[in-house]
Structures are given as structure tokens and as C-alpha cells.
Image (tube, grey):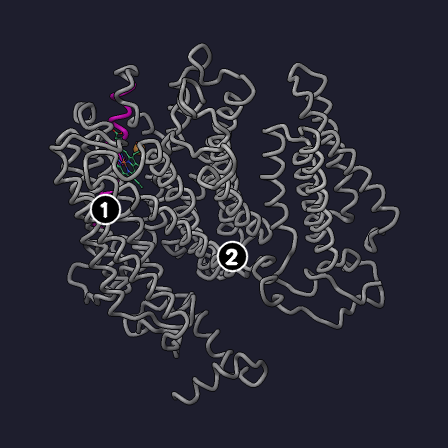
Amino acid sequence: MQITGQLALTVLMGIFLVGVAAWLARVENWRSYTPLASGGGGAHGTGHAEKPSGVIRWLTTVDHKDIGILYGFFGIISFVVGGLMVLGMRIELFDPGATLISESFYNSLLTNHGITMLFLFGTPIIAAFSNYFVPLLIDADDMAFPRINAIAFWLLPPGALLIWAGFLPLGDIVPAQTAWTLYTPLAAGVGNGNQANAGVDLLILGLHLTGVSATMGAINFIATIITERAEEVTWANLDIFSWTILTQSGLILFAFPLLGSALVMLLLDRNLGTTFFAVEGGGPMLWQHLFWFFGHPEVYILVLPPMGLVSYILPRFSGRRLFGFKFVVYSTLAIGVLSFGVWAHHMFTTGMDPRLRASFMAVSLAIAIPSAVKTFNWITTMWNGKLELTTPMLFCIGFVANFIVGGVTGVFNASIPVDLILHDTYYVVGHFHYVIMGAIAFALFAGMYYWFPIYTGRMYQRRLGKWHFWLTMIGTNLTFFSMLILGYAGMPRRYATYLPQFSTLHQLTSVGALILAAGTIIWAYNFATSWIEGPKVQDGDPWNLEETGMHTAEWEWFDRKIETAVTDGGEEESVVADGGGERDDA
Amino acid sequence: MNEQPGLSDQYRMASPWPMFVALGIPIAELGVLFDVFPVAVAGLLLFCGSVAGLLRESEYVSSPWLAMGVFAVVLVGIGVAFVFTDVKLVTRGYAVATAGVVLAVGAVGGSLFLPDDAVV
Ligand code: HEM
Ligand SMILES: [Cu+2]
């Protein structure tokens, strides 16, 4: 039995490798790399087309724009998966008991919702924007290392499969119930529960892969922004989005390898009998320190680029330049540095040394200052401006509003005496969702709407965009404000059941979640149908930015692209149709 | 013999290697972590082979076989360390070393039967 299993696996792996080699041999001729030596063949009459066609194009592309789109699709799929997970939880929470799903399944959904949204939606969807636009904004041909860029993306799908493996019907593998923080000893598989199961190992491996992916991407962005800028793009006029990506990449570079190492240590504890986080070894607190040394910078890794998006988009619809550009950049850098000095504010209640605790409180309060600087700059940018309430602008304004609530609740958390009471309650959940859903997701939606014409060449349906915004704004505030009150009332987080006195607030929260789901469905419908049959964008300035002098590099690129498509019309079939339509309309 | 250009020199913005590099890492990790010999060997082969191909394609090395040879030496070294030192991961060590040996055979065979044009 054992032996035949091994044999079957060996044969399977052999066939797999032979298949890969055969496919590679078919598409790739190893002998044809002949830049120097060969004589006659060197001419390569075929010339250099851009990309192959069909599926192969997407599997082999190293073009930053294609990879950006791949990241975008991946992020949206993850958003749907993570959203369905949380809907399951919220529907369960309509009544106090565990009526619909078991407590343990609730815990699995909770764990995977968090990890999916942070690592499979948040980081990748930001990379969708940065891959597509940073090279355009700094006028580079591509990323500094296009192939590494592709590797970084392709690590994500296997990572996602491993993370979700516990939910797939794979023998006796169970999903993790460790919560996204993976606290030991539970996550080390100690105790009588089932968390020593291989499902948890798979999740940790998957998480490790996404970390490798993020690190590769970060190195690439740092190299690209530093070395690939066009002559006329200087540090002084580098756009704000690229600044935030550069800072974010720096944070990733210091934070994610640390997470990777800690995860490997955890795997060794689980599988090979080491005692890094065992009570008799390094102790469970070591995990918390390592995790949050990564974990806090991670929240800024997620928020800085969306802040950059808002700083970039909001002025376009205010008819004015970003107020205090320099200070927005400085505050980005300040947040980047400070975010490594606050991690223990997640551990105030662990019984750590009170003097240490006080210093972490001080730095945590200090980090609110650069955050507030940005907020004031966005508000002053809009002040007396000519506001145009397009969908992307509405999402930017929603971002600012929600970020204020998220930030202020964060300051309360950072104050030790308050946190001793609120820690591990729904208040904390409300706080970070105001930032993550209310701000980060809003900014990402703003970006998707703003650049929808560039991505697809078409326009979305404006009415549906407005519906999406208002449902999302109302849903977010209903859901997460109820959570803040629940926390004040003493409802602990991470439970599938609750006392009857919390019913009303929990039901409000769940209604909010359903409103969010309705908005999301509208958004998905809008984007899908508009992509297929929306009206074609006719010129490179769909937002009329030229009027206010706010036209930027990526739209100029888009304009050139449209122009060449029209003039080249005669050459390629697909473009003829486009070009023809264009002329008909004109 | 190069009237037929490969994918990545026919198309400026395409390369077949990255996807397989990315696939090799998780397969190798799974195999080594769970101590499943064939999976570990296959994953390491896929990873090292694809990296070699990628290095050759981007012209960081002049021959993929040379890169594979270097990987083979590294893998055998790690495998031997796993088996014979205090790390004592004997079965995993054998897997890593086996991957190294197969890679070495591939490197030698490749350079004999498919010598690279560009090797001057
Ligand atoms: C304005 C500055 C901020 C301050 C002072 C702050 C402070 C805090 C504190 C003290 C906690 C720990 C609460 C507890 O567990 O008892 C916390 C939790 C959290 N914060 Fe913030 N925060 C800020 C901004 C942000 C931002 C921008 C994000 C996200 C991008 C964020 C995401 C989170 C998350 C995810 C948690 C909960 C982690 C967990 O336990 O699962 N915070 N925050
Ligand atoms: Cu924090």
C-alpha cells in the first residue's frame, strides 16, 4: 500500500515533468538564443512581435501591463472568495446560537477570511495598480526585472490553493482555525484540538509563498523606481503614487522576510520537533513579537499605496493640485519609519514590561500625526475647489471620511488604559475594518473606476457606479459602527455565538454586510458588462483633465495608444473594427 | 539550426520560464516539508531547471547546462549535510541529493547532446 502509493506518485511526478519539458521544448527553442555567435541565422527574419496569442500569451507574459491585469483578476477572485466567507459568518451571527454552521467551521471561515483579504486580495490588488501604472508614470519601458515580476505573480495562485486547501475535499485535511495571527501554542499544533493537522501546514506554506511573492515584487519596484525613471522624472517631480509604492516596497522588504522566517520556524516547531515557540523553548511571546513586528508594518503596507491613490485622484476632481505635496511625501516616509516602532501596541494586555509598554504607546500616538497631516492635506485640497462628484471622487471622499473614524479609533486603542478594556473586543474589529474596508477598499475602488477606461478602453455605467458607492458607504458604516458599539458593550471578538443582549447590534452588523454584498454585486455586474459592451472611449482624456491642467503621463500614453490604433487601422483585423467604429462616430 | 526561433526571442514580451519557476517552489517545499520523496525531487528539478532556463534566456549565463551543474552541486551539498550532520533529516537529505544527482546527469547530458550555440 505504502509502496504502491510512492510508486504511483513517482510515476505521476515523472509524467508531470516530462509534460513540462515537452511543452517547453515545443514553445521554446533552446538553440535559438544566438545574439553573438551565429552567423546566418542571426538575422531572425521573423522579427520581434510583442506577445504570442491566446492563453499562451497570459501564461508567458512578462509585460508589466499584462501582469498588472493578472494581479487584478487574481485580487478580485480573492475578494469574492473572502467576501463569501464573511457572508457565511455574518449570516450565522443573525442569531445568538450556532444554528447554521458549527463553531469550528465559523473559526475556519474567520481565519481564512482574514488571510484571504489581507494577503490574497489586499497586497495583490495594490500590485495590480503599481504594475500597470508605475512604469507608465515614470516613463520606463517596463519593470527593472520583468521575469521576476512574472515569477512574483505566478507564486500567488499556488499560494492561494494551499491557503484554501483545508476547504477542499482532500482526505482528512481540515481548515486552520488559528485566526490570521497564528498565535502559538494553538498554531504550533499543541493541545488536544485538531490544529496539528496538515491543513494548517498547508496554510502556513501558502502564506510563505505569498510573502516570497510580495518580497520579489518589492525588490522589483525599488529597482524600477530608482533606476528606470526617464530623464525628466526627478525625485522632485516623482508622482505621489510612485512615492507611496516606493515606501511600501521598503516596508515589505523589511517586514515580509521576517514573516517568512517566523513561518518557517513555526513549521519546524510543528513538524520537526524544534522548540522556537514552545513554553520550554523560546516561548509563545516570541511568536507574538515576531508576528507583530511584521504585522503592524503590514497594515501600513496595505494603507500607504491606497493613500497614494487618493492623493493622486482626489486633486483631479477638485480642480486643484494636491495641497502640500511635499508634506504628503514626508508624512509617507515618516509613517514608513515609525511603523516599525509600534508593534507591541497589539500586545498591551500580555503582561509585558510596563515601561516598554509606555514607549510603544508613545510611538503609536506619534504615528497618528503624519496620518493626520495627510488627512488635512486632502481636506484642504478639496477646500474651495471645483468638486466634480464622479464615482472615483465619491470613493476618495468616502476614503477620507472613513479613514478619520478608523484613525481616531486607532488612537484610542493606542492608549494603554483604554486598550486594556477594549482589547479583543469588537471595537478592535470595527477599528481596523474602518481602515481596511472603509479606506483601503474605497481607494482601490476609486482607482478601478478612475482607470477603467485605460484598462478596458471603455466607460463604465455611471449610474451603477453611484449605486455601488452609496450602498458601500452605507453598508460600511452600518456594519462597522455597530461593531464599535458592540465592543464598548463588551462583546469579545472571534466567537460564533453571543449572549442575547447583543442580538440587535449583531443583526444590524449583518444587515450592513448584506448591503455591502448588494453593492458588490452591482459593481461586478457593472464592470463585467461595461468591459464587454460599454461605450468606447474616444480620446485619451475621458475625465477632461486638460481643462484644469491636471493631465498626467498615463493618460498621454493612453492617448497615443488610441491614436496609433486609429492610424494603424488598416494593418490588423481586430483594430480595423475598432478604428472603423471610431471613424463612424466621428 | 536556428531557423525556428523560440517563443521568447520571437516575442519580446514573453517568457515561458517564470510560471514554472513559481510552480517549482511550492512543489519542492511541499515535498521536503512532508518528506514525500518523489514530490521533493520533482519540485527541485522543476525549480532548478526553470531557473537555469531563465538565466540562459536573459543571458546572465552563457549555457543553461552550466547553471544546472552549479545547482546540482549545491543540492548535493545540502542533501549530504542533511544526511550526515546533526540536522539528521536523513530521508529529506536523500531526496535533495537525488535531485542534485539527476540535475547533474541532465547537465552533463545536455551539454553533450544539446550544446548551446552561444557557448563560444
Ligand atoms: C492612525 C494610526 C493607528 C493607530 C494609532 C492604531 C492603533 C491600533 C492598536 C493600538 C491596535 C491594537 C488593538 C488591540 O488589539 O487591542 C490596532 C489594531 C489593529 N489595527 Fe490599527 N491603528 C492605526 C491605524 C491602522 C491602520 C492604518 C490600519 C490598516 C491599514 C490598522 C489596522 C489594524 C489591524 C488589522 C488591527 C488588528 C489586528 C488584530 O488584532 O487582528 N490600524 N490598531
Ligand atoms: Cu498596529
Q: Mark 1: which amino acid?
A: Phe
Q: Residue furthest front?
A: A1
| Residue drawn at x 68%, y 22% as measured from the top left | B82
> Quadrant location of residue B28?
top right
Name the mark on residue A67. Answer: 2
| Separation (CA) of disc 1 from disc 2 | 30 Å
Are marks 1 and 2 in one subunit?
A: yes
| Disc 1: residue Cβ within 8 A of ligand 1's nearest atom | yes
Chain at tag 2: A
Residue B5 location in percent, x, y?
Answer: 75, 64
Residue B71 falls in which quadrant of the image? top right
* Quarter of the image that includes the N terminus of chain A: top right
Q: Position of residue B29 (x, y in %)?
A: 59, 34
Image quadrant containing the C terminus of chain A: bottom left
Q: Position of residue A46 (x, y in %)?
A: 72, 71
Quarter of the image where ligand 1 sits: top left
Quadrant of the image occupied by residue A379 = bottom left
Q: Which mark is residue A112?
A: none
Residue at the extreme top: A280
Horizontally, residue A60 falls left or right of residue A438, namely right
> Is A245 positioned to the left or the right of A363 in the image?
right
Q: In the image, what residue type sits under mark 2?
A: Ile
Q: Dot 1, how many residues are within 10 Å of its Cα: few (below 14), some (14-19), or many (20+)? A: many
The residue indicated by pointer 1 is A403
Is disc 1 placed on a helix, strand or loop? Answer: helix
The answer to which of A105 and B32 lies nearer the viewer is: A105
Residue bounds of the magenta highlight: A356-377
Q: How many marks?
A: 2
